Image (spheres, rainbow, N blue to C red):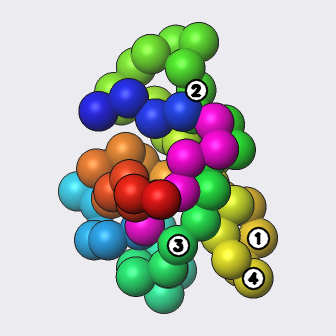
Amino acid sequence: MTFRNGQKVEIYQKSADESWESYMDEFVGLHGIITDPDAVKNDPDALVEVSLDEKGTHRFPQDCLRILED
């Protein structure tokens, strides 16, 4: 899946990636906007920066993100 800057996403599940931290569990179910898709690398293992509604900006593994339709 390719993420683009400005896309709306949901943190829909915990990630299996080793970069997932336990504090991130509270973000499951929240929506946000991609602010840095790391498209330069185009690496499926790269973290994606997401600005979450009222929770700040965080970097997430890609397997926990789902693109939302407008």
Q: Residue at x 52, y 13 (%)?
A: 41
Q: Position of residue 56 (x, y in %)?
A: 76, 70
Residues packed near mark 3 inside 10 Å, few (<14), some (14 to 19) or many (20 plus): many
Q: Is residue 9 above or below residue 5?
A: below
Magenta-span inclusion, residue 36: no
**C-beta proximity under 8 Å, tags 4 and 1:** no
* Residue bearing the label numbered 3: 31
Which residue is tagged 4?
54
Q: Nearer the viewer, mark 1 or mark 3?
A: 3
> Mark 3 and mark 4: span between their CA atoms?
10 Å
In screen coordinates, is 49 left or right of 54?
left
Residue 50 percent coordinates (x, y): 62, 55
Foreground disc of the pair 3, 2:
3
Percent from the top left, x then y, of residue 17? 30, 50
Residue at which label 2 appears: 38
- Near mark 4 (Cα within 10 A), the count class, few <14, some 14-19 or many ≥20, is few
Amino acid type assigned to the residue bearing label 2 in the image? Asp
Residue 65 in view of the camera = no
- Residue 56 is labelled as 1
Q: Residue 35: x and y, percent?
A: 70, 44
Amino acid type shown at disc 4: Glu
| Disc with the residue nearer the chain's start (3 vs 4) | 3
Residue 45 versus residue 10 in the image, above or below? above
Name which residue lies at 55% across and 20% down.
Answer: 39
Image quadrant of residue 11?
A: bottom left
N-terminal-most mark, 1 or 3: 3
